[in-house]
Amino acid sequence: MAILDTNILIDYLHGRDKTGWMVERLSESGEIAITSINKYELLKKFPREPKLASLLDQMKIYPFDDAASSKAAELWQELRKVGKSIDEMDLLIAAIALANDEILFTEDKAFGNIDSGKISVVK
């Protein structure tokens, strides 16, 4: 299962080809997921988008649960020790993905601050 970050799905909803192929291929195979944080970000920006509603019906949505909250705190401490940071919402998204042992695909280079082989920054 691949967790897609909000920026990839926004590109898809705007019809941009850069990562749209990824969304289409993964949704066809049933291997697409997001986090509850991504869902919030998407619904906030696109409250009545039929294309989004259809996409959400096809996705697994990982919640921010106890394991993710522990992972988020651990990540925050690790970043603080090395003098790095990441947006709080992005930290929660990464924590959910890592707590569930899933790969997170994003276009946001700030995720590169997290030292994990499970986060893929797409260019």
Image: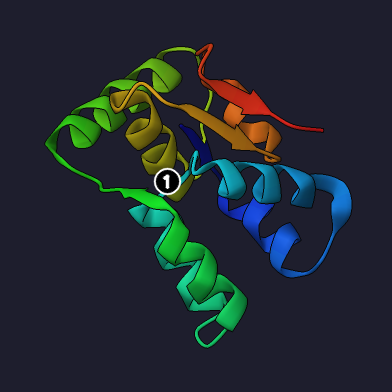
Residue 115 versus residue 48 in the image, above or below: above
Please identify the quarter of the rendering in which residue 81 is found: top left
Residue 72: image x %, image y %? 30, 32
Residue count near mark 1 (Cα–Cα under 10 Å), binned few <14, some 14–19, many ≥20? few
* Quarter of the image where one finds residue 107: top right
Say if 115 sits above or below 94 in the image. above
Residue at 47% x, 74% y is 43
**Whole-percent x, y for residue 88 in the image:** 42, 46
Q: Give the amino acid at mark 1.
A: Glu
Percent of width and height locating residue 83:
51, 19
Query: Quick one: 5 or 57, which is closer to the camera?
Result: 57
Colour setting: rainbow
User: In the image as oriented, which residue stretches furthest toward the right?
Assistant: 17
The residue sitting at the left extreme is 66
Residue at the location (56% across, 72% down)? 52
Residue under pointer 1: 88
Query: Which residue appears at 38% of the width and 16% of the height?
Result: 78
Residue 8 lies left or right of residue 61; in this view the side is right
Q: Which residue ends up furthest to the front in the rendered image?
A: 29
Residue 45 is situated, as x and y percent measured from the top left of the image, at 56, 76
